[in-house]
Image (cartoon, rainbow, N blue to C red):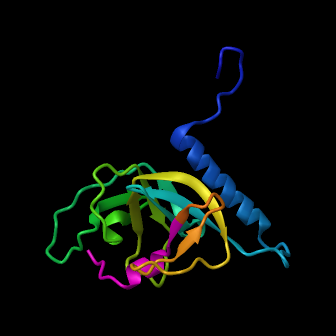
Amino acid sequence: MTENGDITPPSGKDAFARRVLHERARIMAARGRDQAGAAAGRLLVMLDLAGQACGVDLHAVLRVTDPVWSDMPRRPDCPPGVRGVHGYQADLYTVFDLSVLLGGAPLEAPGVMLLLRSVSSIPLGRIALLASGAAGTVEITGTPTPLTPSGFPQASLPDGRSLTVIDPARLFSSRYVGV
């Protein structure tokens, strides 16, 4: 609270988490409404990945949190993108460095971790992704094209920037990711 009794608006990571929750609530409230004629939009959580803009479908994200994980001993068959494990509500998440999964250098100081929802097409039960930072949500319309050399589509944002759209099922379907 401020000196005159006003409530101080949240800032930083709290503000981002509130925006994501507000967007999710808006989406859930809109379910079942007839949206015929409206352009099909797709909400993405916008990530910064060492200067590269990426987006992950908001419906695939369970939680956005601080990057906290426990290191684990490296096994010879463990892919280089695995950074460790994270426990959340009695579930164990395998924590991956998204930069390494996309062919880049490991992140020295990740700023955000996304816990993903379970998807039957992904061979692992629970997955968390590390990124440099998160910048809120963005809506894209239509199908993002064309594909990048890595196989991930690019979307154009209203301000003219380009965004790599990350589909977790596609990201993990083409790689061996067991731990």
Residue at 68% across, 27% down: 7
Residue at 70% across, 58% down: 25
Is residue 52 found left or right of 9 in the rendered image? left
Residue 178 picture location, percent across and down: 28, 78
- Quarter of the image containing the N terminus? top right
User: Is residue 114 in the magenta section?
Assistant: no
| In-front residue for pair 172/72 | 172
- Quarter of the image containing the C terminus? bottom left
Q: Is residue 91 visible?
A: no
Is residue 159 found left or right of 54 in the rendered image? right
Residue 133 picture location, percent across and down: 45, 51
Q: Is residue 42 visible?
A: yes
Residue at 53% across, 81% down: 146
Give the residue at the far front of this rendering. Answer: 160
Is residue 142 found left or right of 107 in the rendered image? right
Q: Which residues are magenta?
A: 163-179
